[in-house]
């Protein structure tokens, strides 16, 4: 059996308000457009998550909402808000779905992506993981608790700019 991870950094957020906390920053117009495009891209690849693990920040919540999937109901957790790679791995190990979409933030999500894959894709933006970057990774395991560093196979990597231009 294999398990699939859709690893997504939140889409572009707004910096228009200096009164909002970082946690409460919404997406900007480009971010909303990018998240819609990411959802469409996943559907064209027949990728639909059966579990969503997301940071509790507003911009990750809005990214998921704009992706346009009606199900599943996401699990929002403070543990993924600016989490480092080890915390992301620990959170993922508790997953139960076969196809899990995980929404998070840099720098942790970029570091996690670089360490969880066996071989990085030949893409100039993979290691800096810009807003909306999404990697589809397959693991040859039966349970998420069995995933290890450098064990995932990259099936696809995309940044929103490639989908919206």
Image: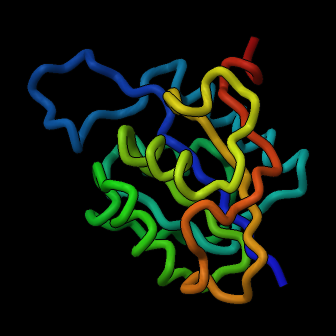
Q: Residue furthest top?
A: 165
Q: Residue at x 50, y 72 (%)?
A: 92
Q: Is residue 98 above or below residue 77?
A: below
Q: Residue at x 34, y 60 (%)?
A: 80
Instruction: Describe the colour scheme in one phrase.
Output: rainbow
Left-right relation of 36 to 113: right
Q: Is residue 88 left or right of residue 147?
A: left
Say which quadrant the C terminus sits in. Answer: top right
Location of residue 142 in the rendering, given as x and y in whole percent from the top left corner: 73, 88
Q: Nearer the viewer, residue 64 or 81?
A: 81
Coordinates of residue 112 in the picture (x, y in percent): 48, 52
Q: Position of residue 62 (x, y in %)?
A: 46, 44
> Residue at 64% of width from left, 42% of height from top?
134
Which of the two residues, 32 or 4, is positioned nearer the viewer here?
4
Quadrant of the image containing the N terminus: bottom right
Q: Which quarter of the figure has residue 101?
A: bottom right
Q: As displayed, is residue 9 above or below residue 163?
A: below
Q: Is residue 71 above or below residue 163?
A: below
In this rendering, the count of numbered labels is: 0
54 to the left or right of 6:
left
Q: Quadrant of residue 150?
A: bottom right
Residue 79 image position (x, y, % from top left):
28, 66
Q: Residue furthest left?
A: 19
């Amino acid at each position: 059996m294999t398990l699939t991870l859709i690893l997504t950094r939140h889409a572009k957020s707004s910096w228009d308000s200096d009164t909002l906390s970082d946690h409460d920053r919404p997406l900007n117009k480009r971010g909303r457009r990018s998240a819609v495009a990411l959802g469409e891209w996943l559907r064209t690849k027949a990728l639909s998550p059966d579990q969503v693990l997301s940071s509790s920040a507003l911009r990750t919540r809005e990214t998921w909402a704009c992706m346009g999937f009606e199900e599943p109901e996401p699990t929002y957790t403070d543990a993924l808000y600016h989490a480092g790679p080890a915390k992301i791995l620990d959170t993922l190990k508790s997953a139960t779905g076969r196809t899990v979409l995980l929404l998070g933030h840099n720098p942790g999500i970029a570091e996690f992506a670089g360490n969880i894959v066996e071989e990085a894709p030949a893409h100039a933006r993979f290691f800096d993981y810009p807003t909306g970057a999404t990697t589809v990774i397959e693991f040859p395991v039966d349970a998420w608790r069995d995933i290890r560093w450098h064990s995932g196979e990259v099936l696809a990597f995309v940044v929103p700019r490639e989908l919206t231009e």
